[in-house]
Structures are given as structure tokens and as C-alpha cells.
Amino acid sequence: MYYLTQQYVKKCLPLFVLTFMVYSTVHAQHPNIIYIMTDDLGYGDLSGYGRKDFLTPNIDKLAAQGIKFVNAYSAAPLCTPTRTAFMTGRYPARTPVGLMEPLTPSKRDSTVGLTAAFPSVATLMRASGYETALIGKWHLGFLPQNSPVKNGFDYFFGIHSGAADYISHKTGPAGRRIHDLYENDQAVYPEGYLTDLFTQKAVTFLKQKHNKPFFLTLTYNAAHWPWQGPNDKPYVDSVDLRIGGSAAVYAAMMNRLDEGIGEIIKTLDEEQLSNQTIVIFTNDNGGEKYSDNGGLAKAKGALWEGGIRVPAIVKWPGKITAGSSTQQVAITMDWTKTILSAGGAKMDKNFPLDGIDLLPILTGDKKIIPRTIYWRTFQRLKQKAIRMGDWKYLQDEKGEYLFNLIADQEEKNDLKAKEEIIFKRLKKKYADWEKTVLQPMPL
């Protein structure tokens, strides 16, 4: 018996060693990835993008260490559809929950959400050997099957709803507030300002021992309403969470958000993880009441540039030229495809991605990849838009427009009469695309 065991070990040991070496080599080649998505920032809300009345030095430092996008877009001008697009890598209107603009606490909306029937970026990354975590805002469903831990995340800490009191952690309409802070699927009741709690959990995650590469999705709810600074009091349950605030309160919220991202970058340095970690920073849609949309037209909810153009920054030491910028047009689903590509993940052929891999842009292997991207809203505002190259066709409830975004990013000069051929081409291209997605869902 002893002899047989020795022979077995002699025969199998080389195979075990080889398997371990292959596993180790594969995973050594794949970077850690942190995807940071903030909430309701205006295009000009960062000092590196033009904000003057407060500074965001830590996010600016991130840009100084990486690449800055000036033509990045969200997949929608509202929370839920953009988050759907990131999680699935597909246009929002290819998935039922992406038709919600956005999910609300209503009885009807409570039955809709992301499920494992649609493979998420986390599911695919976990299958590729990654440890996955989501810390922050979910806003993709409230039922058990909609939970982040049922959709590919090994760990979740955050809120299920679109907005919660930063101090009391309650959500819902005035007079009907409920608690909304969870760790995995259990309600938890820590004291603290939500932005700080999310930062603390992210730092803890980064400091723990990792036996494989990690994919951390950090979705701060800042600077979404309720407009509360770290030293403010919680809202009384009878008061609407959407009221109040001031420019000073907004600045305090942004300051805390910037400090939190600074803590993330500091932790990466302290844990000697920086050189093997891609950090992506972006936002879910345009800003609203106290935001600076950088002189762009309209705001959150609109398919004008102020509702969909967002800041985006990527840092990857040794791979991305520090302090660089790009004119590349990018949209939410591109980050999904880029993350999956960097992680060596296998795509699901039954759910082809709409995004492109931006790694060649990030590393400088390519200058510009031509893009044509689409948007549609229906429930709150009936709007359609397409950007193809420099041109944008837009339809809202007041009419149709054609803009050259290179010459006129503020969308002041409608060229549909002057450039009739381009106008008709883009309108036709949009109509063809709309046939490929789900029909809108009325309110």
C-alpha cells in the first residue's frame, strides 16, 4: 500500500506542480480591476474638468496618473438603465430592467430587476477566476433573485434603492421610509455617513488577503440627492428626500467623495497593489440641481449632452501614459467589454456585447476607434439620439435636431436643414437600431 502511494505521488506530482504553475501564471497575467461609478455628477463637477468653486484633488491626481476621456458617455441619462448597461455590457433596452427609467419603490417596479438569466460582468469575471465584490448603490431590483450576490458578486455591501438618507440609511417616499443598507442579503445597521461607509468597506476589502485577482465595483451614491453633508442631520421621515440642499452642501458631499477615492488610491499604494490594478472612474449620467454640467445643454434625464456626457479616467501604471487624454468616444458598455478583456473572461455568445474593448486606446496601440452609439428614453421624456463620428441626431418632445459636436458641443446650432443628407442617414440608422431592442415600457 505504501509502495503504491509512493508510485502515485511520483507519477502525479509533476502534474500537480504543472497545474499550479499554469494557474499561477494565468492569474498573474490578469490585473486587479476597480470600477468606480459615482452618481449624478455633472460633466464639469471635477476640478480637472472645469469646476472652479471647489476642488477634487484626489480624482485630479488619478487623471494625472492615467488617461482622461473628454468624449465619454453614460448609456442613459438615468440611474437604472445605465447600471443595467454596465452589468450586462449591452444597451439598456436589451434587458427588461433597463426599460425602467429608473426603478422606483412602486408596486409594479418592485417585481422588476436584473436576474441570472442575463449574465453579468461579475458572473463572467468570477468564471474567469476573479474574486468579485460590489460596494455601494445597486438599483437593479429588490427581490431575492435580483440581489447582487445572485448576480455574480461574492460580496455586497450597500443600498438596493436609487437613493437613501446618507445618515439614517432609510429610503422611500415621505411617510413610508424603510431601512436600506445590506451586507450580502442581511440588513445591517452601522452608524456613519454612507460615502464614508462605502469607502471603509472598500479599504477593508483591498487590505484582506486575496488568493486570486479581484474585481471591485464601487458605486458611490454621491452626489445623488438627498443633499446631505457628513455633519448634517437625517431627514425627518415625513420630509421628501429630494428637497433642501445648497451649493455649500453639494461641495461638502463632493469633498467627502474625493477624499474617499483618495483613500482607495492610498490603500492600493500601501498594499503594493497599484502596479497590478486598473482603476476606472466614471459616472452614471449628467448632474442635476447643484451640478456643473460644463456648459453642456440640459441635465440629468435629457439626451442632450448635459444629460449623458460624463467624466471618465483610467489609471494603470506601466500600461497607460500618465497625464494623457483622448478624444475617443466611449460609452458605459465599453467599460464592461474592456474589463472582461483585461480579465481574460469568456463572453457568452448568447448575449453579444454592444461595447468595444478600449484597451488599445488605453495603452496607446490605437489612436481612435470609430464609434456609432445610440440612446432612447420613453417613460419620463420621449427622446431618441445617435452619435456617429462627429454628428449627433436628436429627437425630443419639441422636435428633431442635427449637431456637429466637434464644432458645437453645446448643441446650439441645428444643422438638419443645411446637412439634410447626414440628417436623413442618421435618422434611418437610428430607426434600424431601434428595431433590434425591446419595445419601451409605458409608465
Image: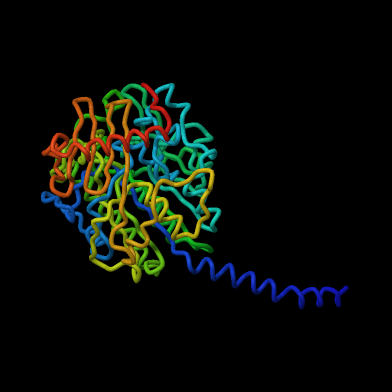
**Residue at image point 31% right, 31% down:** 377
**Residue at image point 53% right, 34% down:** 144
Q: Report which quarter residue 442 is drawn in.
A: top left
Q: Position of residue 312 (x, y in %)?
A: 28, 53
Residue 287 in sight here:
no
Q: Position of residue 372 (x, y in %)?
A: 31, 46
Q: Is residue 109 above or below residue 280?
A: above
**Residue at image point 52% right, 62% down:** 212
Q: Nearer the viewer, residue 421 or 351?
A: 421
Q: Is residue 17 above or below residue 158?
A: below
Q: Is residue 217 left or right of residue 321?
A: right
Task: Please say which color scheme the image uses.
Answer: rainbow
Q: Is residue 334 left or right of residue 144?
A: left
- Of all residues, the one furthest to the right in this rendering is 1
Which quadrant of the rendered structure holds the C terminus? top left
Q: Is residue 6 above or below residue 437?
A: below
Q: Is residue 100 above or below residue 15?
A: above
Q: Position of residue 132 (x, y in %)?
A: 49, 53
Q: Report which quarter residue 222 is drawn in.
A: top left
Residue 64 in sight here:
yes
Q: Position of residue 223 (x, y in %)?
A: 26, 42
Q: Nearer the viewer, residue 379 or 434?
A: 434
Q: How many marks?
A: 0
Q: Nearer the viewer, residue 203 or 77?
A: 77
Which quadrant of the rendered structure holds the N terminus? bottom right
Q: Nearer the viewer, residue 268 or 435?
A: 435
